[in-house]
């Protein structure tokens, strides 16, 4: 089997894949929810929009649950620090994530205009809030987060909820909202039929434009306005997972070092811009399937850009830079990483196979006839 | 030092959200299997009524499932949010079962549940049946992994402390997986879930029979529920999870506390049917005892001793003293990581390190603890006796009641007299909330009984919390209470409405009218 250093690298990549899985799979559910109030004008239209993700959102959501579990298992200190540090923000995400299933299940069960309108608002909020907060969280990771450890590795966080809403993080939050809105519009165009699709196409293309522009703004900001972090003296890559054993310096431009050291990494931001632009064009040409593929790749490239800029950092500390969490001192033990890799290698392909089968069974458009045909409340 | 306020608030929040989550889980476990059974009959006989049954109970299943998932995410996030030191200290072991649960089980149930509802027209009968069973399989495997994680909190096998990383690390994943406590818990918990599912079907069907509606539908549903419920009720009582309570020292403390058994009795120990635990005097007053029964329940034998609380406290005191050696060695090792002597001292005593940490509640510099403080810390290993004593008795009483009720239902079903006795139907209807009460009490027995530990013998609960302000935890606690209460009201209203409407009720469709109005 692989050594500790390799396993840590593999799990860093797998963390990226998981985050991409969340953003791509659950992302269009969030996007659809964000689009709902803007693309649907009657109850039938709203039900068309909701039912495009009706049978699949529960499976998609597991990416998020798996993400939480895998970070816990493979990067326990990252899980502990991020989840307790961003405490109130995480609570908002939780509230949104609880609201969403309930909105799905409850909305169409009662024949009452106000009841349905209330759940539609809940549905919208449940899509917007996580999309925004996940982006904001990424932004804060890039600027550094105010936490420290005592010598028993007990973490103290000295920031506030409002402190998370700094301008750079807000730009990142908007990138996230814009890219997921585009992704949702692409999915809507692929699955639905009727007026919501046309409205969604218009909004989706604007969202693509906004995502590209904001992504470039964030990139320039990182290059000129934000101090990155770097490990001062090389540390062993197979040492104990204790972040207090290194020294870290902050310097402008440190987040761009990897692009100079490994020029192939420049592909990530370039692909991100190209794919989001291509997605907008394809959506305009009504090639929804390809547009969805392109937005998926664009989202993956944006997440890859963030990860490659930070590497080997995972969560830098602005308060005590040496406490920053990196790939080399945050992971589980070698045995746990190996067990988890074995489980992933066995089950992830199986999951992908049956997920693909489910989507293929459910192929076919969602339109007015579809939502009206239903007579047993099995459809949302 | 972390303030006690945050500890109590975090415990309250975790306890409330877990109890709330556990309102939905048992029904998911049981009803998913019942759906599989009903649909199997449909596929084998081709009779439409069985399809109607699957669809109708599936509707209730769906509402419940969504709530279970939503409240389950809270549980997963809360370990990191409120129990950051716990997450760091044992994440190496505890995280893996949670992640594997996602990979192996949760993806399965969540991916196929959509197809369960949307797939009736798109799949062949056999394909749809497979989908239903996959949902049931996923739910039940999910419970297995969660209980492997929980079992490890009760009886932490296959792990050791690593001073370089200041945390527990896994040494044998096999031991974690095949933890005897986890096995006992799994069987007991899923059986309780099956009882809950059966009771829901039994009660609502009884309601229809009382109302004289959906007679054929209700009788068939009741027959399934009666047979499955009887088997499950027998399993939940006979295969109770006390069998796991003999596995370790602290599990023994749990059963001694459940029994309010202060002194060790010669084997086989008697079972206290009734009495009033006196916490000051360390005795139980007005005891009514049944000879032999506890020995049988706890050790499955007539010759093994069940130790009493006082004996276990004496053990704990010894372990604290031993743990102080480990603590001292750890401190010295951190000053000089290369010291082989201290490493050897730590290795020899590391199993008791957690016991020394109990003293942290009394003083920060635990190495200077006085004998009185050590004795006090030893007594802190006794969980709250009275809640355990009563919760356990009510739960067990309910368990026997379930056996009786389902046995009657089973006999009536085999005589085809399910609609004959209104008294029975009323009893079945009114028993609806009881499995939930039993399940919640079971959770209280298991987790209150684990105190003062979050990981038994390894990490005390008060050290496991995040460094949060009390104000932050108050905010989220209030948020959860308000939010969850609202959802509970809406959820129950919707379940009652769906149940009252009954099978085959046409969907009241506002869409056309609404569309026209706009």
Image: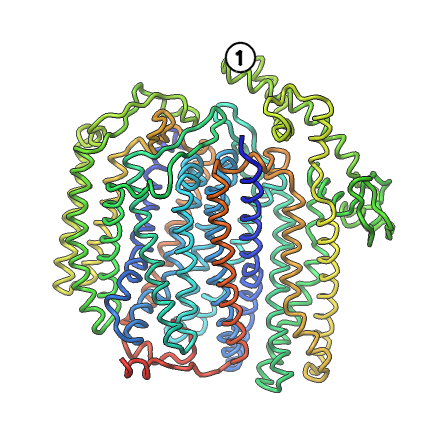
Q: Is residue A86 left or right of residue A198?
A: right
Residue at the limit of the structure toward the bottom, as seen here:
B212
Q: A162 above or below B459?
A: below
The residue at 74%/44% (across/down) is B257
The residue at 57%/49% (across/down) is B15
Q: Is residue A186 left or right of residue B454?
A: left
Q: Quadrant of residue B125?
A: bottom left
Q: Is residue A209 left or right of residue B7?
A: left
Write down the residue under mark 1: B339
Q: Position of residue B177 (x, y in %)?
A: 56, 43
Q: Position of residue B66 (x, y in %)?
A: 46, 62
Q: Chain of mark 1?
A: B
Q: Secondary structure at mark 1?
A: loop
Q: Is residue B305 visible?
A: no
The residue at 54%/48% (across/down) is B14
Quarter placement of the N terminus of chain A: top left
The residue at 17%/52% (across/down) is A210
């Amino acid at each position: 089997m692989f050594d500790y250093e390799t396993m840590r690298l593999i799990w860093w990549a797998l963390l990226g894949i998981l985050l991409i899985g969340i953003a791509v799979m659950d992302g269009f559910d969030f996007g659809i929810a964000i689009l709902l109030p803007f693309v649907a004008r009657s109850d039938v239209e709203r039900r068309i929009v909701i039912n495009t993700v009706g049978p699949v959102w529960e499976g998609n959501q597991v990416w998020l649950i798996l993400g939480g579990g895998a970070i816990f298992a493979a990067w326990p200190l990252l899980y502990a620090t991020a989840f307790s540090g961003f405490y109130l923000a995480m609570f908002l995400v939780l509230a949104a994530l609880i609201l969403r299933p309930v909105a799905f299940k409850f909305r169409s069960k009662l024949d009452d205009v106000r009841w349905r309108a209330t759940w539609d608002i809940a549905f919208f909020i449940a899509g917007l809030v996580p999309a925004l907060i996940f982006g904001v969280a990424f932004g804060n990771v890039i600027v550094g987060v105010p936490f420290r450890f005592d010598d028993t590795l007990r973490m103290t966080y000295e920031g506030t909820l409002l402190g998370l809403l700094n301008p750079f993080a807000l730009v990142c939050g908007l990138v996230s909202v814009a890219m997921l809105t585009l992704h949702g519009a692409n999915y809507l165009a692929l699955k639905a039929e009727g007026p919501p699709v046309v409205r969604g196409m218009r909004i989706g293309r604007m969202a693509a434009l906004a995502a590209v522009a904001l992504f470039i703004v964030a990139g320039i900001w990182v290059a000129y306005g934000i101090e990155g972090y770097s490990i001062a003296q090389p540390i062993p890559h197979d040492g104990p997972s204790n972040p207090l054993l290194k020294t870290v310096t902050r310097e402008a431009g440190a987040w761009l070092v990897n692009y100079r050291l490994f020029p192939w990494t420049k592909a990530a931001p370039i692909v991100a811009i190209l794919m989001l632009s291509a997605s907008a064009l394809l959506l305009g040409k009504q090639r929804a399937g390809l547009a969805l593929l392109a937005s998926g790749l664009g989202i993956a490239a944006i997440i890859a850009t963030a990860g490659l800029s930070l590497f080997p950092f995972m969560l830098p500390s602005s308060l005590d830079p040496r406490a920053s969490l990196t790939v080399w001192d945050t992971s589980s033990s070698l045995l746990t990483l190996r067990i988890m890799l074995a489980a992933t290698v066995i089950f992830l392909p199986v999951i992908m196979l049956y997920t693909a089968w489910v989507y293929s069974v459910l192929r076919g458009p969602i339109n007015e006839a579809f939502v009206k045909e239903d007579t047993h409340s099995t459809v949302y | 030092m972390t303030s006690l306020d945050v500890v109590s608030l975090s415990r309250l929040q975790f306890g409330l959200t877990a109890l709330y989550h556990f309102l939905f889980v048992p029904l998911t476990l049981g009803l998913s299997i019942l759906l599989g059974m009903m649909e199997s009959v449909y596929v084998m006989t081709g009779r439409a009524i069985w399809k109607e049954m699957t669809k109708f109970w599936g509707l209730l299943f769906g509402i419940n499932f969504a709530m279970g998932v939503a409240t389950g995410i809270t549980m997963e996030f809360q370990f990191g949010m409120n129990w950051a030191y716990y997450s760091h200290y044992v994440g190496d072991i505890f995280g893996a079962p949670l992640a594997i649960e996602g990979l192996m089980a949760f993806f399965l149930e969540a991916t196929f549940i959509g197809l369960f509802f949307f797939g009736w027209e798109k799949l062949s009968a056999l394909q749809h049946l497979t989908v239903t069973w996959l949902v049931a399989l996923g739910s039940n495997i999910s419970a297995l992994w969660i209980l492997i994680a929980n079992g490890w909190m009760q009886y932490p096998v296959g792990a050791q402390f690593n001073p370089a990383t200041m945390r527990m690390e896994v040494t044998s994943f096999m031991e974690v997986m095949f933890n005897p406590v986890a096995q006992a818990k799994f069987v007991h918990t899923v059986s309780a879930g099956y009882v809950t599912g059966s009771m829901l079907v039994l009660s609502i069907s009884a309601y229809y029979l009382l109302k004289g509606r959906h007679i054929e539908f209700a009788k068939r549903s009741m027959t399934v529920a009666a047979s499955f419920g009887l088997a499950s009720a027998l399993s939940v009582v006979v295969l109770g999870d006390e069998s796991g309570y003999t596995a370790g020292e602290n599990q023994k403390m749990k059963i001694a506390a459940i029994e309010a058994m202060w002194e060790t009795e010669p084997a086989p120990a008697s079972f206290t049917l009734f009495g009033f635990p006196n916490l000051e005097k360390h005795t139980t007053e007005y005891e009514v005892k049944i000879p032999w029964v506890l020995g049988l329940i706890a050790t499955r034998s007539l010759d093994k001793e069940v130790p009493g609380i006082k004996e276990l406290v004496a053990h704990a005191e010894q372990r604290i003293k031993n743990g102080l050696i480990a603590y001292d060695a750890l401190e010295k090792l951190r000053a000089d990581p290369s010291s082989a002597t201290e490493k050897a001292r730590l290795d020899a005593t590391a199993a008791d390190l957690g016991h020394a940490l109990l003293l942290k509640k009394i003083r920060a510099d635990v190495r200077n603890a006085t004998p009185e403080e050590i004795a006090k810390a030893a007594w802190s290993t006794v969980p709250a006796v009275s809640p355990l004593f009563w919760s356990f008795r009510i739960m067990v009483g309910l368990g026997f009641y379930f056996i009786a009720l389902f046995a009657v239902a089973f006999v009536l079903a085999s005589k085809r007299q399910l609609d004959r006795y209104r008294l029975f139907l009323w009893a079945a209807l009114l028993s609806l909330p009881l499995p939930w009460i039993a399940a919640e009490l079971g959770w209280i027995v298991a987790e209150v009984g684990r105190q003062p530990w979050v990981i038994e013998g390894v990490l005390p609960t008060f050290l496991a919390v995040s460094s949060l302000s009390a104000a932050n935890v108050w905010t989220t606690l209030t948020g959860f209470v308000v939010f969850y209460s609202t959802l509970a009201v809406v959820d129950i209203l919707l379940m009652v409405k769906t149940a009252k409407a009954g099978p085959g009720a046409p969907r009241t469709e506002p869409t056309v009218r609404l569309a026209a109005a706009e």
